[in-house]
Image (cartoon, rainbow, N blue to C red):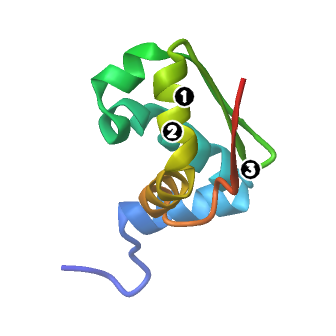
Amino acid sequence: MRKPNDVTVKDAISKMLDVYRLRRKFDETSILSIWPEIMGTAIANRTKQIYIHDKKLFLRIESSVIKNELIMVRQGIIQKLNEHAGSEVITEMIFL
């Protein structure tokens, strides 16, 4: 039986992330970890470096052909990644 002041684990973790201002870093880390699943193994294997700084996703791709394809669909990728995070974590993609 639930008591009136009981909180679900999901709500407690969400509140903790907000209180300690860890939400943005948590969302960034979840995006980096989901990259291979969203983009597929072919692109993930050719991604040599990936990090997020100031709402910008920085990517180093070893294949110029894949890099050009990603440049053409960058807005769709940004939208998918932000949908996964549930908020606007990425506003721009930069290829190194």
Asked whether, in this view, residue 54 is left or right of residue 90, the answer is right
Q: Tell me how far mark 3 sits from mark 1, CA to CA.
A: 20 Å
Could you say which is closer to the camera, residue 84 or residue 57?
57
Q: Residue sitting at 44 percent across and 32 percent down?
A: 33
Q: Earlier in the sequence, mark 2 or mark 3?
A: 3
Seen from this angle, which residue lies furthest left? 1
* Structural crowding at the residue carrying mark 3, measured as other residues with C-alpha within 10 Å and reported as few (<14), some (14–19) or many (≥20): some
Could you say which is closer to the camera, residue 48 or residue 20?
48
Disc assigned to residue 70: 2
Which element is circle 3 on? loop
Label 3, on which residue? 55
Q: Nearer the viewer, mark 2 or mark 3?
A: 2
The quadrant of the rendering that contains the N terminus is bottom left
Residue bearing the label numbered 1: 67
Q: Residue 80: image x %, image y %?
A: 43, 57
Q: Secondary structure at mark 2?
A: helix
Residue 95 in the image, given as x and y percentages of width and height: 68, 30
CA separation in Å, label 2 and label 3: 18 Å
Could you tell me residue 11's position as x and y percent? 45, 68
User: Residue 68: percent from the left, percent from the top?
Assistant: 54, 33
Number of residues whose C-alpha sits closer than 10 Å to that of mark 2, classed few (under 14), some (14–19) or many (20 or more): some
The residue drawn where x is 50% and y is 61% is 79
